[in-house]
Image (spheres, rainbow, N blue to C red):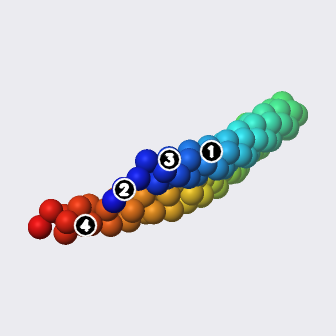
Amino acid sequence: MFKIEDSSKLGKEAVDSMMVSYTTAAKGLQAIATETADYGKKSVEASVAHFEQLAATKSIETAFQLQASFVKTVFEGYVAEMTKLGQMYASLAKDAYKPVEASVQKTTATVKANVEKVSAAAA
């Protein structure tokens, strides 16, 4: 039969696993925030450097070449950064779910076993 002590133990394990999950999520979100801030800083620095180069050009052709090169570089950098952030979010979701998954599986197995015991006793 299912006992209150079992319920209390499962509840404590669930809370513990959620705390581990929240801690993992917080660390992952902090890493993502740091990465985003670093990308923003690099982007601003690159834009300022590009503007300085653009202001120093003497011909329209050179300015167009610089601008085309800059746009290509910015786009490639953006795609790479978004890919990296996407991987970081996916990793965060997997890592944060792991502790909860084990707790859910354990609780499900315990409840299933108790239901089977009750069903067998009632039959």
Real-space Cα separation, disc 4 to disc 1, in angstroms: 31 Å
Q: Are marks 3 and 4 in contact (CB under 8 Å)?
A: no
Depicted 100 relative to depicted 117: above or below: above
Which residue has dot 4 on it?
116
The disc, 3 or 4, on the residue closer to the chain's N-terminal end is 3
The disc, 3 or 1, on the residue closer to the chain's N-terminal end is 3
Depicted 37 relative to depicted 4: above or below: above
**Which of the image's four quarters has the C terminus?**
bottom left
Judged from the image, the secondary structure of the residue bearing numbered disc 1 is helix
Which amino acid, mark 3? Ser
Which amino acid, mark 4? Glu
Real-space Cα separation, disc 2 to disc 4, in angstroms: 11 Å
Which residue has dot 3 on it?
8
Judged from the image, the secondary structure of the residue bearing numbered disc 2 is loop
Which amino acid, mark 1? Met
Q: Quadrant of residue 122?
A: bottom left
